[in-house]
């Protein structure tokens, strides 16, 4: 009888779309604790005197903002170093959560591998939406409605709208695309990589040693974080781009021209750059990236980013660092989009990262 009841409940939840076939027999996640908090931030006090007669007016009141929001989960018998996840442009911590088609994202995949996870909404985004400054008027990702479905299909290299590339690892059903498009969000204040890195540095100071995992525009926040704290033990970056790589200010590469625009670097003092040579760094790029200039915007933009990423890796290693660039098609992994962590083979990519963490002795208890 109990088995019949269980099967009936299972059938009901499946028909309601509450479970997917991949999750029915999934390994359970057992947590020691979970929670959330704000980190970093600033305040600004408006001039004037507060009055209860006009209690909705700003005079004499203080605005809070520019902090990051952090949601964390710590499994039982967790490994020593947690993974801290930083999203990219017009995204939030949802990047790392459930995939568009309902499978485990990197959040759950690494919890099951025994890592604590910290999911971050950077300042002025998502659940850290309070800001002490207004967004830039020319920021296309700072205003509703956001008319960008063609743009956000093409730039992340899903394909040529509305068709996926033939080898694409993006889920093929319409609902997955719907979920993907609804994961984008707007900036509620000026985009400032240093404000975000300030908050990230404070997060690492709070939790101690950890591994920073970044995506896309969040890459530059990752490069800036070790300049603010000694607690970053490694950086893993998925397709960093849309934001500057950091180089010694006297050893700057020339910009790389693409159909989207120039991919340029940013110079910093050598004493700061050397901090990036003290930790292992690995960078992953996916498929359908042009190998020579083309007018196809998505593949060509990421061609430029890939070229600059190689220059960045070479420069770190030139100065005694430990940096690696992995172009997945070159190791036999094909079809990955810009959003590798949500692609159909994300479990394979998580295993690939876990192997690297083991090689670097970062998976210790």
Image: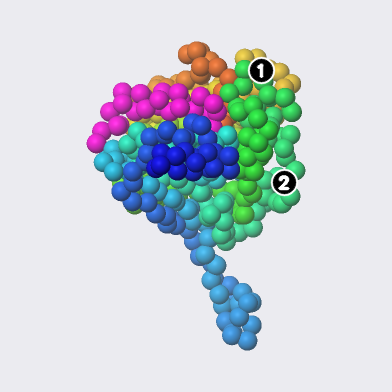
Element on which disc 2 rests: loop
Q: Which residue is at a point 49% across and 28% down the rendered structure image?
A: 346
Task: Give x and y (percent) for residue 202.
Answer: 39, 51
Above or below for 274 versus 327: below
When the figure is inspected, residue 289 is found, relative to residue 97, above or below; the finding is above
Residue 166 badge:
1
Q: Nearer the viewer, residue 107 or 278?
A: 107
Residue 176, label in figure: none
The residue lying at 49 percent from left, 43 percent from top is: 9
Q: Which element is circle 1 on? A: loop
Q: Give the left or right position of residue 261, taking residue 33 as reference.
A: right
Measuring 67% from the left and 50% from the top, which residue is drawn there?
142
C-beta proximity under 8 Å, tags 1 and 2: no
Classify mark 1: residues with Cα within 10 Å, few (<14), some (14-19) or many (20+). Answer: few
Whole-Å distance between the Cαs marked 1 and 2?
28 Å
Q: Is residue 87 visible from the viewing direction of this image? A: no
Quadrant of the rendering where the N terminus is positioned = top left
Q: Return the residue at label 2.
A: 146
Q: Which percent across, then down, holds residue 159? A: 68, 24
Which residues, given as a range, are shown in magenta?
A: 340-365
Query: Percent x, y for residue 261?
Result: 69, 30
Examine the image and state in which quarter residue 111 appears: top left
Q: Is residue 356 magenta?
A: yes
| 13 within the magenta span | no
| Residue at the extreme left of the image, as rendered | 365
Query: In the rendering, at what x and y percent does residue 321 appear?
Result: 36, 26
């Amino acid at each position: 009888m109990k088995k019949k009841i269980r099967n009936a409940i299972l059938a009901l939840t499946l028909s309601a779309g509450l479970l997917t076939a991949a999750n029915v027999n999934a390994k359970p996640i057992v947590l020691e604790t979970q929670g959330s908090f704000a980190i970093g931030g600033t305040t600004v006090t408006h001039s004037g005197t507060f009055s209860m007669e006009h209690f909705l007016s700003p005079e004499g009141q203080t605005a809070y903002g520019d902090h990051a929001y952090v949601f964390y989960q710590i499994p039982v018998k967790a490994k020593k170093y947690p993974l801290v996840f930083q999203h990219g442009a017009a995204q939030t911590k949802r990047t790392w959560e459930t995939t568009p088609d309902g499978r485990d994202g990197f959040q759950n995949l690494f919890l099951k591998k025994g890592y604590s996870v910290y999911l971050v909404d950077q300042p002025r985004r998502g659940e850290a939406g309070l800001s002490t400054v207004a967004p830039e008027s020319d920021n296309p990702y700072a205003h509703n409605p956001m008319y960008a479905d063609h743009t956000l299909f093409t730039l992340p290299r899903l394909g040529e709208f509305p068709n996926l590339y033939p080898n694409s690892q993006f889920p093929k059903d319409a609902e997955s695309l719907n979920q993907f498009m609804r994961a984008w969000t707007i900036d509620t204040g000026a985009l400032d990589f240093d404000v975000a890195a300030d908050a990230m540095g404070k997060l690492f100071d709070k939790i101690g040693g950890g591994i920073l995992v970044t995506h896309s525009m969040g890459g530059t926040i990752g490069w800036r974080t070790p300049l603010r704290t000694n607690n970053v033990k490694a950086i893993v970056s998925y397709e960093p781009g849309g934001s500057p790589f950091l180089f010694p200010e006297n050893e700057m590469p020339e910009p790389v021209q693409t159909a989207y625009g120039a991919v340029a670097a940013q110079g910093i003092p050598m004493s700061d750059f050397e901090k990036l040579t003290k930790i292992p760094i690995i960078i992953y790029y996916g498929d359908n990236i042009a190998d020579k200039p083309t007018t196809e915007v998505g593949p060509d933009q990421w061609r430029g980013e890939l070229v600059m990423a190689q220059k960045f890796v070479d420069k770190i290693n030139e100065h005694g660092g430990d940096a690696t660039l992995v172009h997945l098609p070159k190791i036999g992994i094909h079809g990955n989009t810009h959003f590798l962590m949500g692609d159909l083979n994300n479990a394979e990519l998580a295993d690939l990262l876990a192997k690297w963490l083991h090689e670097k002795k970062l998976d210790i208890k």
